Image (cartoon, rainbow, N blue to C red):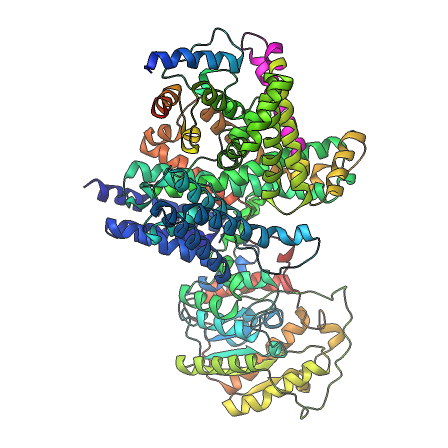
Amino acid sequence: MKKSRFFLRMTAFALLFCLLLYGADRLLVDRSAAARTESFYAEPKDSLDVLFVGSSRIMCGIYPLLLWEQYGMTSFDCAGSAQVIAQSYFQLKDALNFQSPRLVVVDVSTVANGNVYTGVESFVHTQLDHMRSPLVRLEAIFTLLPREKRLEYCLPLVKYHSRWSEIRREDFDRAPDTSRGAVVYLGHSEKEDVPPPELIPRAEMGSLADIPRTYLEKIVALCAEKGAEVLFVNLPCVRDRDFQLAYNAVEPLAERLGVPYVNFLYEEELGLDYEREMFDTAHLNSLGAEKLTAWLGAYICENYEIPDRRNAEDAPRWAQDLADFAGRIR
Amino acid sequence: MTRNEVYEQLNAVFRDVFDDESLTVADETTAADVEDWDSLTHITLIAAVEDAFDISFDMKTVVRLKCVGDMVDAILQEL
Amino acid sequence: MSFTSFSFLCFFALCLVGFFALPQRLRPWLLLAASLGFYAAAGLPALGWLFATAAVSWGAGRCVSAGRHPGAAYAGAVVCHLGLLFALKYLNFFAGREILTLAIPAGLSFFTFMAVSYVTDVRRGICPAEKNFGRYLLYLSFFPHVLQGPIDRYAGLTPGLFAGAGFEERRFLRGAWRMLWGFFEKLVIADRLGILVAAVWKEPEAYAGWRVAAAVVCYALQIYADFAGYMDVALGAGEIFGITLAENFDTPYFSRSVPEFWRRWHITLGAWFRDYLFYPLQRTGAFRRLGKFLKGKFGKQAAKNLPAALALAAVWLFTGLWHGARLTYVAWGAYYGLLIILSMLCEPLCARLRPKKKSLLFEAFRMARTFAAVCLGYVLFRSASMGEAWRVLVRIFTAPFAAGKGFSAAGLGMADYAVLAFALGLRLLVSLCRVKGVDLREKLLALPLPLRWGAALALIFSVILFGIYGPGYDAASFIYFEF
């Protein structure tokens, strides 16, 4: 009799403990990038028609709010800094549990990186700590990360517990991020100049490493399963020969998979002024992003059936967010 | 030998080893009760007791001895 | 597997479930399986050595009790055990070069000493030989004490070790509180102080002498929190299973003399050397003859003191060496040997100098003096080489107020010092309760439920938030983009 009462009490204690642990987690796990990553889940279910997936180039180069302004397209930049293709696969898998887009645009720029995850821990934490599909998150941790790192990702508190001495006011009143995953870069970076790229011939291609190739294939398969079309893009950048060989190598893969591939390095129609419209050798600034977003929006409308939602129920919210965003970029 | 007779001789040994004429031990006396009786002097005490009664304790007794009562029991066993 | 790791917590949780779910007679077997599994994490060769040690001592025990060449069996076993210890741990050190390249199995010094204590106790008739090999193997390999002790005696653990005690709420909670406290000591106090101590030891010349001295004091607190913390986890775990392991610490820093310190610090090691080296050595024919000779020539005092001093010298050299194959350990042992011999020789004089009435001030003085002596010893103990120890001592005594770095350069921030103040305060409180004979755990269990739970959760979250574990968090790495 007493034994069962004890176990009941212990269970209650354990539950209380878990509750407090969850509170500690929310308080201490670094949220500096959380506003952006968590704003994705604030979008109503199945309301986004296009998802842009990939690295920081997507975040800087494509402005979903402008796409809505010009074409009524509802979209989101589901991207992460330095995110390699393998990570993008899991990011997409998680996103597809909340949205049913008609089109998924995949940034292939990290295809030159043959690793399973980017070595920059904080970026991986930003991506995984806030992921809301617990099974996808666990799958990502066990697939992408080496054994010794798994504990700190399964329990982020292991990494962040010492942050209690750094809690500031900002941790409590962070303004929500309404830019739909976009990040605005103005002007130029002081660290490097941006000369126009020296392009190698398009036909010259290297071979893709196993890991990025496998994950591109998995992304296409996943989208097919969920009834979404796929588009590969390589956003403008200044990179040397080795990178370009990899970018070009995506072309035969895309053809084999039946996926269109827009390599902006060769897209003269875009008319990008590298000196004026790039922030640094890898990211567009606000001028370049506006230009690219407009071109890409037109391309998507021409080739895909994406509804115009400028008169939908949700439109006033998009309009308001657009007004705020426009103030930041212009 | 009776227990009291053992104590007569034992008290003499204790007084000699620990240089204390007023020292008197009983069954419940332990090392804590006698100043200077610690692990450093234990063997000296044991050797003196063995000499006085012309007996020999085994290691089991030496190590397990907790109080004077144990010692007296051991002495009586050996005699 | 470290006690203060996540994997140990998972392992222990599984053990608990298994232990209380199984019927009584199977429980010791679960403990054996768990202990072997736990030890296997140290590697299969190590497990092999443990097994071999168990087999030899168990076999010798049976021979001795059966009367089959008891003397030879006993001597053979002791030679095997100490020989193995010497070969694996000390051969290269004494040879001056690398002869043997086998890895030292974890806990070798501990389970070797336990095995020797077993065969010796069987030989002396103190405990009967264990007929069942599985039971004996459990004694040696029991996971709470196999890696760092306590050095339990066979008679002290049985029959509780094999009893498979059923679940009892009070015992369970007491054990759990003790384990939690051990985690707190290790992760919050010891590992935090360790950062500061390591920084100062790396470059003592960069700090003023008094800061180096403060670091030595911090080391005294660190090593106590580390070792005693480990013991608390071990003994707490044992308590949960209904097994009472031997205490290893009794608020040692409250000792009034160095000999007393060694009766309160690493108690089971001191007891082992006393029972298996100090006493037997003094009982040998050679020592007895020496005693008689001295009594005749130089009187009672000399007869009492000189053999004891010689035996002490042997004990302390070996105690130092036991800690590791390093010159600084031997020097440390010699240091204590000298102090204890001197203390023994001066005892009659000191007894006369001591005030008749117990004055608090004088007691405090004695404790401070003892602590200072212990800290001096720690300089040797902590240093990897005699040169390193010398550098630390020179800095303390020749440049006490020289210019140098502040403590902020030693790897700890203001927040850390606040945590240390809180944690050490708590540590002092717990020690004072122990000294005054207050059973703190009983008091905690007697509290009303909300307070009890509050205290437990506060301690648990202190460990989670303030513990030193996990990859270092670097706020600077959260800049937005790099690629």
Q: Residue at x 65, y 24 (%)?
A: C342
* Location of residue C37 (image quadrant): bottom left
Visible residue check, residue A174: no
For the C terminus of chain A, the image quarter is: bottom right
* Location of residue C334 (image quadrant): top right
x, y percent for residue B47: 49, 24
Q: Which residues are magenta?
A: C350-377
Asked if C398 appears above or below A163 in the picture, the reply is above
x, y percent for residue C477: 64, 57
Q: Is residue C174 shown in magenta?
A: no
Asked if C209 appears above or below C39 in the picture, the reply is above
Q: Residue at x 67, y 51 (%)?
A: C93
Q: Which of the two residues, C385 or C483, is positioned nearer the viewer here?
A: C385
x, y percent for residue C404: 79, 37
For the N terminus of chain A, the image quarter is: top left
Visible residue check, residue B59: yes
Q: Which of the two residues, A214 or C198, is positioned nearer the viewer here?
A: C198
